[in-house]
């Protein structure tokens, strides 16, 4: 029956009918649907009248059923020609592809890329739907600009040498294909280099080096197109050729670089440090356009790298995340090293620094203090800064301060009630009046010190994120309830708009959730209790500027906070309130 259709030649193709053809198609399908309906009725009638089965009747019934099936297939095949996706213009289809790609990747944040191999990448999936989509995908060069190089580990106990060589050759061809498809667009490159175990033979070791070098030779000519890069690998003699990527080539477009570099501690430490120094001092970091850098795990102190190189390394950085121990046996990154880092990068706008030194003796304040004129956001992780750190800095534009010293909280709680227990409080005293956003672990501050900050210092704060330590001293009684009481002090945090509390302890029989009810009613919603029998709401005016409150509880729900607020007559209009509990305690 398909032969009687003027569209037979277009079936099972990507043909997009015109407006006039669509009208004709719809009429053709409608006529066939009427024929199919009549055949279905005739078949049902024939089956009812089929009292005695004869060969002639059975043949007639089979013929009608065949005609019905053919008509239904005709309708299905021709209805596919009416699919709206066939008529989408190629430029719109291109935009849809780009939107889909952005929904599964974050091009501006390559460290969050999913671990897609080229054959499973969304762009590859799009190009394999149909011939027309493949043609559009291959013509859209920006679909191929996120190049992920996932080198497999070489462990003879888990993978055959021949299989690993075959995978490496396939990977090289795939990367070369993507490079050609994306040319001449700027590209985002992700390198995850698998490690090589020492148990392989010397011949295999030499072969692995050659395969790494072949991959590097494919990537080297594209360095002028790199827009961002993510690199995660263990420094080994086998992968030493990878260092060639960062020496010599010019990265004229590079704006963002992320390095997660580890070392094999079972090998020669002198060679490992030499490789790390070569990487830390590579010409990539002298790129004038480079603005955002993440350095983690094992790295040379940037101030040392800058003074040891003839190139202007790290001069253009405005955003830095540094979470690495410096090169050297037993070396740890502490407050003094953080000051050197900030001093060597005066153009920073935001900085995230991981402090790993277990023992940080007080520092002698620098004079004159280190001036970082553009720094607006500072995050200090893992350990508190030592005393003397804050007076050594002059941060005139600092607005956001994050003190994420979780590890120190767990170790310093028994003596935390001593005033000025660590340099974090000293830093808060100095920078508090100009802060707009603050994150801290409240257990790490003495109660009186934190109360002073909340009531007297943080007058311009609009966003406050407070974390409770997962491990607490037995000598401290309900610190989370005390925090809420401190927040209720009249005049505290007058400009606060957003409050988020994390890991609040609401154990069985504890007063925390009732304290939350009182805090929300008084501080946020302006509701008060009047006498023993009546309740009233304080009116439509909110007592503070607070408009968003999110509380993360450490245990399951014990008290119906929303019901308690409603029983007080509190209106939740105009307030974004989130109460989040653990599913199990």
Image: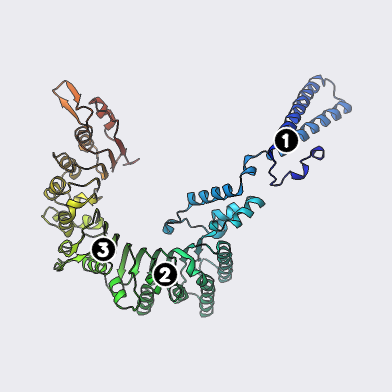
**Residue found at x 52% / y 51%:** 98
Q: Secondary structure at mark 2?
A: strand
Q: Give the answer, above or below, for where 463 lies relative to 261.
A: above
Q: Quadrant of residue 257?
A: bottom left
Q: Could you give the CA–CA distance between mark 3 and mark 1, rounded to whole angstroms? A: 70 Å
Query: Mark on residue 25?
Result: 1
Query: Mark on residue 234?
Result: 2
**Residue found at x 74% / y 37%:** 73
Q: Position of residue 560 (x, y in %)?
A: 28, 31
Q: Give the answer, above or below, for where 180 lies relative to 453.
A: below
Q: Nearer the viewer, residue 84 or 515?
A: 84
Q: Could you give the CA–CA distance between mark 2 and mark 1, rounded to whole angstroms? A: 62 Å
- Mark nearer the N terminus (2 vs 3): 2
Q: Quadrant of residue 535?
A: top left
Circle 2 or circle 3, nearest the eye? 3
Q: Secondary structure at mark 3?
A: loop
Q: Which residue is mark 3?
A: 355
């Amino acid at each position: 029956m398909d032969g009687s259709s003027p569209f037979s030649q277009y079936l099972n193709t990507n043909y997009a009918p015109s407006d006039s053809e669509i009208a004709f198609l719809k009429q053709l399908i409608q006529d066939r649907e009427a024929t199919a309906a009549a055949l279905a009725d005739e078949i049902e009638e024939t089956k009812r009248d089929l009292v005695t089965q004869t060969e002639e009747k059975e043949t007639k019934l089979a013929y009608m059923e065949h005609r019905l099936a053919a008509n239904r297939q005709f309708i299905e095949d021709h209805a596919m020609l009416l699919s709206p996706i066939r008529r989408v213009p190629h430029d719109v289809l291109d935009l849809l592809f780009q939107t889909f790609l952005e929904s599964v990747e974050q091009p501006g944040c390559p460290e969050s890329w999913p671990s897609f191999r080229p054959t499973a990448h969304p762009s590859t999936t799009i190009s394999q739907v149909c011939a027309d989509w493949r043609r559009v995908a291959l013509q859209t060069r920006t679909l191929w600009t996120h190049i992920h190089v996932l080198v497999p580990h070489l462990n003879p106990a888990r993978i055959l040498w021949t299989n690993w060589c075959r995978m490496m050759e396939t990977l090289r061809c795939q990367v070369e294909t993507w490079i050609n498809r994306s040319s001449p667009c700027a590209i985002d490159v992700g390198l995850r280099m698998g490690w090589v175990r020492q148990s392989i033979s010397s011949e295999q070791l030499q072969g692995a080096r050659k395969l790494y070098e072949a991959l590097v030779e494919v990537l080297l000519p594209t360095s002028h197109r790199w827009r961002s890069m993510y690199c995660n690998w263990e420094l080994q003699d086998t992968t030493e050729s990878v260092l060639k990527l960062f020496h010599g080539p010019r990265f004229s477009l590079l704006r963002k670089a992320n390095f997660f570099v580890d070392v094999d501690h079972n090998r020669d430490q002198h060679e490992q440090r030499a490789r790390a120094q070569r990487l830390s001092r590579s010409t990539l970091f002298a790129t004038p356009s480079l603005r955002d850098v993440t350095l983690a795990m094992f790295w040379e102190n940037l101030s040392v790298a800058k003074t040891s190189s003839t190139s202007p390394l790290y001069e253009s950085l405005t955003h830095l995340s540094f979470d690495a121990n410096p090169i050297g046996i037993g070396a740890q990154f502490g407050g003094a090293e953080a000051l050197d880092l900030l001093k060597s990068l005066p153009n920073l706008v935001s900085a995230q620094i991981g402090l790993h030194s277990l023992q940080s003796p007080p520092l002698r304040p620098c004079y004159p203090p280190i001036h970082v004129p553009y720094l607006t956001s500072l995050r200090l992780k893992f350990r508190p800064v030592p005393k003397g750190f804050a007076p050594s800095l002059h941060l005139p534009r600092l607005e956001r301060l994050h003190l994420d010293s979780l590890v120190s909280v767990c170790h310093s709680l028994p003596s935390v009630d001593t005033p000025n227990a660590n340099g974090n409080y000293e830093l808060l005293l100095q920078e508090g009046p100009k802060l707009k956003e603050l994150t801290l672990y409240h257990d790490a501050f003495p109660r009186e010190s934190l109360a002073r900050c909340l009531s007297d210092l943080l007058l311009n704060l609009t966003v406050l994120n407070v974390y409770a330590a997962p491990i607490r001293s037995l000598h401290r009684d309900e610190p989370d309830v005390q925090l809420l009481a401190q927040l209720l002090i009249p005049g505290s945090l007058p400009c606060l708009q957003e409050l988020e509390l994390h890991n609040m302890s609401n154990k069985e029989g504890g007063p925390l959730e009732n304290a939350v009810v009182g805090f929300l009613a008084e501080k946020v919603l302006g509701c008060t209790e009047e006498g023993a029998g009546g309740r009233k709401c304080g009116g439509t005016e909110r007592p503070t500027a607070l408009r968003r409150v999110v509380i993360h509880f450490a245990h399951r729900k014990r008290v119906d906070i929303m019901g308690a607020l409603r029983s007080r007559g509190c209106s939740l209009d105009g307030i974004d309130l989130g109460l989040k509990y653990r599913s199990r305690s």
